[in-house]
Image (tube, grey):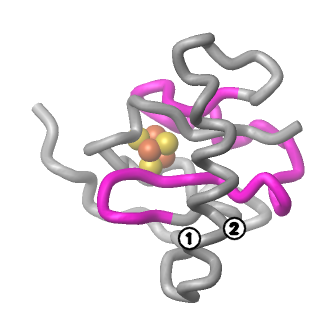
Amino acid sequence: MAFVVCEPCRGCKYTDCVVICPMECFYQDETMLYIDPVDCIDCGACVPECPVNAIHPDTNLPEKWQAYVELNAGRAKELIALGTARVTEKQEPLARS
Ligand code: F3S
């Protein structure tokens, strides 16, 4: 099991979640964040931190967001390879009204 960042993060990136993560397993691209399922220890600490409720356990994911399991795993792997995409500090969120 792992936690998964879903659609509400897209275009948002509040990054409250990264500060609490004991494993530093969040990675970002220009649109959203992803959790590396290999490093995620399933603590769930990030879940209540997200103001838009974007993070869910892969075992209890809304049906419409099932694709985000593979998306998080795949993008995390690609972004880890870049070596510059890990996020551990809060950033300015993207504009969203
Ligand atoms: Fe995204 Fe929520 Fe984190 S909007 S960056 S999952 S706090």
Q: Position of residue 10 (x, y in %)?
A: 34, 41
Label 2 element class: loop
Query: In the rendered structure, are the residues bearing label 2 and label 1 in contact, judged by CB atoms less than 8 Å apart?
Result: yes
Q: Residue at x 63, y 24 (%)?
A: 66
When asked about the image quadrant of residue 92, the answer is bottom left
Q: Which residues are magenta?
A: 28-56
Badge 1 local density, few (<14 within 10 Å), some, or many (20+)? some
Residue that sits furthest to the top in the current view: 63
Q: Residue at x 62, y 83 (%)?
A: 81
Q: Residue at x 68, y 19 (%)?
A: 61
Q: Position of residue 45 (x, y in %)?
A: 72, 41
Q: Residue at x 71, y 58 (%)?
A: 36
Disc assigned to residue 88: 1
Badge 2 local density, few (<14 within 10 Å), some, or many (20+)? some
Q: Position of residue 88 (x, y in %)?
A: 56, 70
Q: Amino acid at mark 1?
A: Thr
Q: CA distance from mark 2 to mark 1?
A: 6 Å
